[in-house]
Image: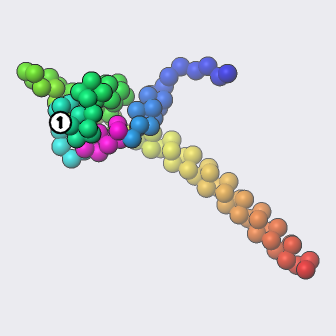
Amino acid sequence: MVQYSATRFDTTFAALADPTRRGVLERLGRADASITALADAFHMTLTGMKKHVGVLEQAGLVTTEKVGRVRTCRLGDLRLEDEAAWLEAHRQRWAARLDALDAVLADLKQSTGSRE
């Protein structure tokens, strides 16, 4: 088993892995919202939404501010450029591999077709 310490990418991708958290980010992209409003919008308990917001906050994707009894959430400062660059590098690598596989299949098809 490979052991490694959690990186920022691990934290970010783990936060983004959950559909509810992605939905929260999408909602906060339109406007700031209280945790209560988010919980209502996603039909969850306040405790459940607090946990989701905590994960997003730990990843730097969301910030919260408490004013009185209301905790307001907004998008964090993390812009995801590094994560997007990492994904693009892997997308290009896979695209190259699939292009090479297409070429092999085309050669096989051509050589099989020429024997008939």
Q: Which residues are magenta?
A: 20-27
The picture places residue 48, in percent across and down from the top left corner, at 30, 27
On the rendered structure, is 49 left or right of 112?
left
Residue 22: in magenta span: yes
The picture places residue 77, in percent across and down from the top left corner, at 28, 34
Q: Please tell me which residue is depicted at 86% across the width and 72% down the height of the picture.
A: 111
Instruction: Tell me the quarter of the picture where residue 21 sits.
Output: top left
Residue 29: in magenta span: no
**Quadrant in the picture for the N terminus:** top right
In the image, residue 65 sits, relative to residue 104, either above or below, namely: above
Majority SS type along the magenta span: helix
Residue at the disc numbered 1: 37
Residue at the far right in the pictured view: 115
The picture places residue 73, in percent across and down from the top left corner, at 21, 32
The picture places residue 28, in percent across and down from the top left corner, at 23, 41
Q: Please tell me which residue is depicted at 58% across the width and 21% down the height of the picture.
A: 4
- Say which of 75 and 26 sits in front: 26
Q: Please tell me which residue is depicted at 35% across the width and 27% down the height of the picture.
A: 55
**Quadrant in the picture for the C terminus:** bottom right
Residue 28 appears in the figure: no
Q: Please tell me which residue is depicted at 50% across the width and 22% down the height of the picture.
A: 6
In the image, residue 51 sits, relative to residue 84, either above or below, namely: above
Tag 1: residue type?
A: Ala
Residue at the far left in the pictured view: 68
Residue 104 appears in the figure: yes
On the rendered structure, is 42 left or right of 34?
right
In the image, residue 84 sits, relative to residue 116, either above or below, namely: above
On the rendered structure, is 103 left or right of 96?
right
